[in-house]
Image (cartoon, rainbow, N blue to C red):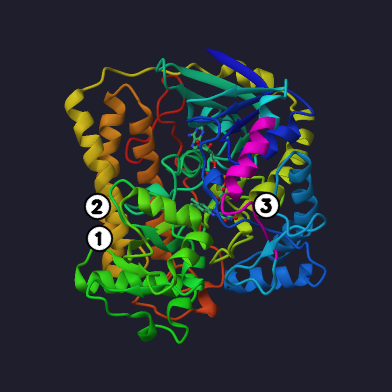
């Protein structure tokens, strides 16, 4: 099946939905999303969205806080523009129906998080993301110009370089033309064609065995864009949240940092405290210091987790202050008022991604990326808390304006669309191989956790690189012989994303922000105060007969 719309959007978190609403004022939109419409990291965001709303706050202060967190790698012009557009963009969200918590009839309640010098976090209790997603989804559902394709997974980008041997992939002459998309229920791969394409597919927390991210976060947009030859930036910077509930069924439940803020104490299995050995602020040390300390203690003792203890705080206070956390822990059999909660650090936020400018434009013409999948230069080497929802919101507005402009000048794109072949649907499933798929999933995630996690060394990184390359070969083999499924496609994407994180980490021979390598424990401003850019310019497309020759050496 071939589907043409003016604008193609992959992903339905804050970035995809905001963009879809904006471009729908100018044309027909296909909103493609691989799960239910609401399923996204956005809906699980707890803390809130940062914006300068208070009289005693200023753009300069928010900019300064962001630059400080970013350790020299933020792009200041991008930071300024996103922060300056924050309040107006937040007001648009409110006009759409988002109900943020108020402190009085006239004022919104603003909270403060680590690294912010002022109260500037708008929130909806501790369910901010859920409330934002609800309002955006309602707006999208009632928009006649937006057609929603749920349980449709974008597989690969279709670009001009794949049709025309004279065009270098990812060069200025290259253009994005469409997407091959798998409909999960039927197994059919549809050809979506558009005048512009937005990747808003979110992050890649699923590359690690412990993550706060939902199952959708498998790095699909990064892998698709990389395979198409687009530039990637700063993949080595992955943020780890210090405390996720450790329980086989509680796979992504985050224990907010406010629990430590309110007096929670981290302990080892034998009850000993340890944070005072790592930082003068003890349990209130910055997020990355706490995550590193827990990781170190776990590796030293071989224990599977550490414990967060609030039993010394009066029970009613804990229940009132953290009702959602209290209830969720209780549902897993832990009464936090009576016993310490088992916790582990968890992969939380991908700072790197598809390199884009302030208009969300990637290095391939007509290709845009926004939200966690992109690297705009806002976060640099470390993300300031609550700046990510802000980035998805503001950047998508800029991207929409630019995409509308480009769609008006789409020239001979229809001719190119006519040359695009339909998907060649491969061969039958080998059920034995499907067992291998689940083992490979597990192996990639453990490999990343053990060797490319919070604390890195050259030896561990090289070991991970060797194994991931073998795994990519194995995955490639059965990718060729399988009927593709969401599971196998996600595995391929997570392995490609893992490879990019490893490559980025090996290239950065220093420690900065979220990247910590014991072999180079200091920052090296002279040589590394710059982005790590990765680009694959081999000419290939994974699946089609009739397109350019495939390079079987790499995925
Ligand atoms: C538990 C948790 C708490 C957080 N708290 C905060 C916070 O308080 N403040 C803050 O600013 N940030 C927070 N973050 C980070 C923030 O939520 C995310 O960075 C942000 O929501 C990302 O938005 P997005 O639109 O880019 O991606 P997402 O919201 O993740 O949406 C991605 C979408 O793409 C779809 N998709 C993925 N691959 C494909 C494909 N191949 N084809 C089609 N569709 C696809 C997914 O199904 C999903 O709909 C938190 C994150 C988590 C996990």
Q: CA distance from mark 2 to mark 3?
A: 34 Å
- The answer to whether mark 2 and mark 3 are in CB contact below 8 A is no
Percent from the top left, x then y, of residue 353?
A: 53, 51
Q: Secondary structure at mark 2?
A: helix
Q: Is residue 42 magenta?
A: no
* 468 sits to left or right of 136: left
Crowding at label 2, few (<14), some or many (≥20) Cα neighbours within 10 Å? some
Q: Which residues are magenta?
A: 120-138
Question: Is residue 14 at least partly visible in the picture?
Answer: no
Residue at image coords 54%, 67%: 381
Q: CA distance from mark 1 to mark 3?
A: 34 Å
* 199 sits to left or right of 302: right
- The answer to whether mark 2 and mark 1 are in CB contact below 8 A is yes
Q: Judge whether 392 appears above or below 74 on screen.
A: above
Q: Is residue 133 magenta?
A: yes
Q: CA distance from mark 2 to mark 1?
A: 6 Å
Residue marked by disc 1: 463
Q: Quadrant of the C terminus?
A: top left
- Image-quadrant location for residue 377: bottom right
Earlier sequence position, callout 1 versus callout 3: 3
Crowding at label 1, few (<14), some or many (≥20) Cα neighbours within 10 Å? some
Pick whichever, 158 or 239, lies toward us: 239
Q: Secondary structure at mark 3?
A: loop
Q: Judge whether 70 appears above or below 164 on screen.
A: below
Residue marked by disc 3: 357
Percent from the top left, x then y, of residue 95?
A: 79, 41
Q: Secondary structure at mark 1?
A: helix
- The answer to whether mark 1 and mark 3 are in CB contact below 8 A is no
Earlier sequence position, callout 2 versus callout 3: 3
- Label number found at residue 467: 2
Percent from the top left, x then y, of residue 541?
A: 44, 31
């Amino acid at each position: 099946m071939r589907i043409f719309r003016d604008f193609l959007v992959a992903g339905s978190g804050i970035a995809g939905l905001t963009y879809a609403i904006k471009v729908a004022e100018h044309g027909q939109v296909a909103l493609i999303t691989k799960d239910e419409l609401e399923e996204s990291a956005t809906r699980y965001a707890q803390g809130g969205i940062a914006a300068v709303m208070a009289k005693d706050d200023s753009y300069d202060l928010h900019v300064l806080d962001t630059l400080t967190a970013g350790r020299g790698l933020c792009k200041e012009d991008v930071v300024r523009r996103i922060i300056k557009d924050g309040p107006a963009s937040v007001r648009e969200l409110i006009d759409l129906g988002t109900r943020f918590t108020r402190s009085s009839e006239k004022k919104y309640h603003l909270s403060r998080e680590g690294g912010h010098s002022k109260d500037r976090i708008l929130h909806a209790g501790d369910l901010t993301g859920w409330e934002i997603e609800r309002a955006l989804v309602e707006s999208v559902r009632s928009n006649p110009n937006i057609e929603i394709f749920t349980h449709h997974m974008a597989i690969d980008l279709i670009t001009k370089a794949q049709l025309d041997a004279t065009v270098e992939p990812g060069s200025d002459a290259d253009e994005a033309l469409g997407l091959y998309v798998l409909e999960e229920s039927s197994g059919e791969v549809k050809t979506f064609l558009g005048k512009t394409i937005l990747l808003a597919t979110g992050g890649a927390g699923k590359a690690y065995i412990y993550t706060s991210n939902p199952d959708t976060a498998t790095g699909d947009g990064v892998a698709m864009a990389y395979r198409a030859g687009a530039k990637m930036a700063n993949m080595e910077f992955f943020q780890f949240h210090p405390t996720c509930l450790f329980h086989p069924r509680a796979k992504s439940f985050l224990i907010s940092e406010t629990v430590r803020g309110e007096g929670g104490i981290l302990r080892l299995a034998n009850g000993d405290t340890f944070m005072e050995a790592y930082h003068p602020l003890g349990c209130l040390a910055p997020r990355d210091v706490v995550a590193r300390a827990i990781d170190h203690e776990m590796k030293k003792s071989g224990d599977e987790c550490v414990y967060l203890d609030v039993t010394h705080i009066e029970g009613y206070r804990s229940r009132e202050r953290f009702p959602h956390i209290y209830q969720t822990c209780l549902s897993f059999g832990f009464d936090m008022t009576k016993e310490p909660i088992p916790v582990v650090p968890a992969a939380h936020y991908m700072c790197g991604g598809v390199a884009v400018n302030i208009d969300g434009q990637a290095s391939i013409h007509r290709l845009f990326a926004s939200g966690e999948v992109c690297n705009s230069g806002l976060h640099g080497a470390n993300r300031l808390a609550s700046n990510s929802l802000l980035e998805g919101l503001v950047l998508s507005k800029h991207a929409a304006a630019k995409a509308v402009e480009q769609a008006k000048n789409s020239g001979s794109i229809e001719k190119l669309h006519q040359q695009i072949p339909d998907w060649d649907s491969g061969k039958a499933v080998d059920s034995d191989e499907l067992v291998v798929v689940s083992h490979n999933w597990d192996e990639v995630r453990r490999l990343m956790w053990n060797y490319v996690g919070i604390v890195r060394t050259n030896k561990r990184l090289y070991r991970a690189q060797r194994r991931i390359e073998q795994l990519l070969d194995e995955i490639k083999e059965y990718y060729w012989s399988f009927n593709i499924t969401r599971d196998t496609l996600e595995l391929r994407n997570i392995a490609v994303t893992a490879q990019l994180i490893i490559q980025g980490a090996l290239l950065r021979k220093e420690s900065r922000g979220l990247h910590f390598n014991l072999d180079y424990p200091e920052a090296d401003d002279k040589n590394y105060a710059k982005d790590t850019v990765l680009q694959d310019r081999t000419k290939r497309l994974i699946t089609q007969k009739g397109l350019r020759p495939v390079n079987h050496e790499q995925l």
